[in-house]
Image: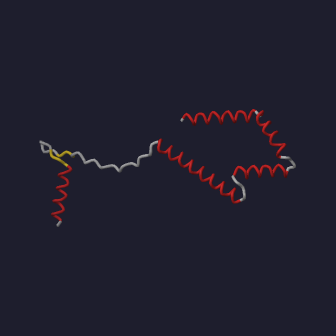
């Protein structure tokens, strides 16, 4: 049995070392080991598409949840519920919402920070439409 082992070992050694014409033993080219395939990273386009789809789904779920909550509280929509809440807050502070809302809109239209924010929003929307 030990002889078989030596014979097997000699065969393996002979395969690894090849004799050249002069009888010198040179290492043969070792077979290249296959490297495990690296996981390919998804292209940027697919990642961007996934991100956009995820954001759309989140926004849709948020809107559905808000609509359900508003209807459970007896309102037609989320916006209607928020408007009612703002009106109630103004009444609690002693302000008439019908008189205060037009004044707030007028002040906002003259506010330089508000104007800059609206211009930025318009520019951002225009860039998004281009893409």
Residue at 60%, 34% in the rendered image: 126
Q: Quadrant of the N terminus?
A: bottom left
Pick the residue in front: 31 or 113.
Answer: 113
- How many numbered callouts? 0
Q: In the rendered image of this protein, does residue 19 appear above or below residue 7?
A: above
Colouring: secondary structure
Residue extending farthest to the front is: 76
Pick the residue in front: 10 or 58.
Answer: 58
Pick the residue in front: 46 or 74.
Answer: 74
Q: Name the image quarter holding residue 29.
A: top left
Q: Quadrant of the C terminus?
A: top right
Q: x, y (%) of residue 77? A: 69, 52
Q: x, y (%) of residue 80? A: 72, 51
Residue at 70%, 33% in the rendered image: 116
Q: Name the image quarter holding residue 124.
A: top right
Q: x, y (%) of residue 38? A: 39, 48
Would residue 53 be found to the left or right of residue 123 on screen? left
Residue extending farthest to the right is: 94
Residue at 70%, 54% in the rendered image: 76
Q: x, y (%) of residue 88? A: 81, 52
Q: In the rendered image of this protein, does residue 55 appear above or below residue 127?
A: below
Would residue 54 be found to the left or right of residue 18 on screen? right
Would residue 51 be found to the left or right of residue 26 on screen? right
Pick the residue in front: 1 or 114.
Answer: 114
Q: In the rendered image of this protein, does residue 1 appear above or below residue 102?
A: below
Would residue 35 be found to the left or right of residue 25 on screen? right
Residue at 63%, 33% in the rendered image: 123
């Amino acid at each position: 049995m030990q002889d078989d082992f030596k014979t097997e070992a000699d065969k393996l050694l002979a395969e690894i070392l090849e004799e050249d014409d002069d009888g010198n033993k040179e290492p043969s080219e070792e077979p290249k080991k296959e490297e495990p395939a690296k996981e390919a990273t998804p292209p940027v386009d697919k990642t961007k598409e996934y991100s956009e789809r995820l954001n759309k789904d989140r926004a849709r779920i948020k809107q559905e949840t808000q609509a359900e909550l508003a209807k459970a509280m007896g309102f037609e929509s989320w916006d209607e519920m928020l408007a009612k809440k703002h009106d109630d807050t103004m009444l609690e502070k002693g302000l008439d919402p019908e008189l205060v809302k037009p004044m707030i809109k007028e002040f906002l239209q003259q506010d330089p920070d508000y104007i800059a924010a609206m211009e930025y929003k318009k520019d951002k929307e225009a860039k998004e439409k281009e893409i």
